[in-house]
Image (cartoon, rainbow, N blue to C red):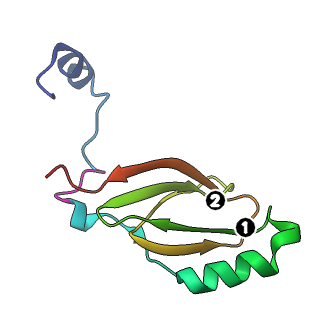
């Protein structure tokens, strides 16, 4: 992929950087799971009238989920059950495979 004509032109003009590269998916900085299915069910029932504040979800094993905190920071959520209590937090629908194998 990096030996394509597009990459060659970008590289020739110093428009590419490799400082954010990681060696493997194990080097990703992931937000760890912070809930359980049971806790998410209880919270969902208790906060039913104000569902805009609460978001409970599960990230399947072998995938990561992309998120945005509404303050300019993006993050990756690791596999497991998560709970977000932030109206401004945006979770992207797509679950990305953490490994190409």
| Circles 1 and 2: CB atoms closer than 8 Å | yes
Most extreme residue toward the right is: 49
Q: Which residues are magenta?
A: 20-24
Image location (x, y in percent) of residue 29: 37, 67
Q: Is residue 52 left or right of residue 5?
A: right
Q: Which of the marked residues, 1 or 2, is nearer the chain's N terminus?
A: 2
Residue under circle 1? Answer: 86
Which residue is pictured at 16% across the width and 57% down the height? 23
Q: Vertical placement of 44 versus 75: above or below?
A: below
Location of the N terminus by quadrant is: top left
Q: Which mark is residue 27?
A: none
Nearest to the observer: residue 4 or residue 46? 46
CA–CA distance in space, label 1 to label 2: 8 Å
What main secondary structure does the magenta stretch of the protein show?
Answer: loop
Q: Is residue 35 visible?
A: no
Q: Is residue 100 magenta?
A: no
The residue carrying pointer 1 sits among few (fewer than 14), some (14 to 19) or many (20 or more) residues within 10 Å by Cα, namely: few
- 76 left or right, relative to 43: left
Please state the horizontal and vertical placement of residue 9, each as a whole percent of the image: 23, 16
Residue that badge 2 annotates: 69
């Amino acid at each position: 992929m990096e030996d394509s004509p597009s990459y060659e032109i970008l590289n020739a003009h110093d428009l590419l950087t490799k400082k954010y590269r990681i060696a493997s998916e194990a080097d990703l900085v992931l937000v760890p799971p912070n809930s359980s299915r049971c806790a998410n069910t209880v919270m969902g029932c208790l906060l039913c009238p104000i569902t805009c504040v609460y978001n409970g979800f599960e990230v399947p094993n072998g995938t990561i989920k992309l998120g945005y905190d509404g303050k300019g920071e993006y993050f990756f959520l690791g596999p497991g059950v998560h709970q977000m209590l932030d109206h401004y937090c945006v979770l992207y629908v797509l679950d990305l495979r953490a490994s190409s194998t």
